[in-house]
Amino acid sequence: MSLLLAMLEGGDRRSIGRSNEVVAAVLRNPASFGQVMQGMSHQDRLVRMRSADAAEKISAIHPEYLEPYQRYLFALAESPEQELRWHVAQMLPRPTLSRSKRARAVNILLDYAHDQSSIVRTHALQALAEFALVDAKLRKPVVAMLVTALQHGSPAMQARSRKLLERFPDVHASPQESAP
């Protein structure tokens, strides 16, 4: 096991452990990003979830790092583990995807929007909104999902939906206007 992944071992699922130290190390040495990505399929669940956390944080700063890992990211999207799914949801809009891969990503996120984890659902809504900002065909259905989440979602989904709806002023009617 690499030294970076060894830093992610131990503790319990409620902790990100030394994930932020791994982020800093990869930002200093970008060639090590692949180790973190590979950690997302490590045999140890804690290493998988913390690798996902680190990869998401790194790719938020450097989305281009995900480019060579698109196929792998889609494979990881099939994981049943909520910790991987919510980080994958955050990362899917970041690489430059072909039209067919974008459609595949949207379908994955639509599936995630019905996940039993409200965190996965919340991040799926965020990612769908990001895709909708650049794809006019997605705007109305995604705004409808956001309005529904605003009215019926968990508190986190409601808060996120409220903020995301502000980014679609040309499509969004206020919840009062759309209520029957």
Image (cartoon, helix red, strand yellow):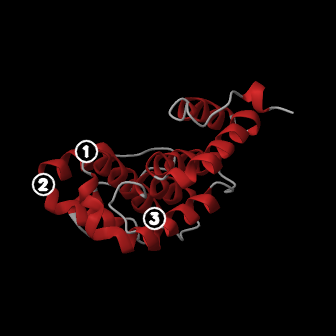
Residue 107 x/y as whole percent: 58, 65
Of pointers 1 and 3, the one earlier in the residue sequence: 1
Tag 1 residue? 21
Image vertical order of residue 92 relative to residue 123, above or below: below
Image quarter of residue 16: top left
Tag 2 residue? 29
Q: Residue at x 45, y 72 (%)?
A: 100
Image quarter of residue 163: top right
Query: Identity of the amino acid at label 2?
Result: Asn
Task: Identify which residue, 35 or 119, lies in the foreground.
Answer: 119
Position of 127 compared to 159: left or right? left
Of tags 3 and 2, which is closer to the observer? 3
Q: Secondary structure at mark 1?
A: helix
Q: CA distance from mark 1 to mark 3?
A: 32 Å
Return the mark for residue 102: 3
Query: Identity of the amino acid at label 1?
Result: Glu
Q: Is residue 98 visible?
A: yes
Image vertical order of residue 131 relative to residue 108, above or below: above
Residue 46 x/y as whole percent: 44, 58
Q: Residue at x 57, y 47 (%)?
A: 139
Query: Identity of the amino acid at label 3?
Result: Arg
Query: How would you rate the neighbour count of disc 2 (Cα within 10 Å): few for under 14, some for 14-19, many for 20 or more?
Result: few
Where does the C terminus fall, quadrant-wise? top right
Q: CA distance from mark 2 to mark 1?
A: 12 Å
Q: Secondary structure at mark 2?
A: loop
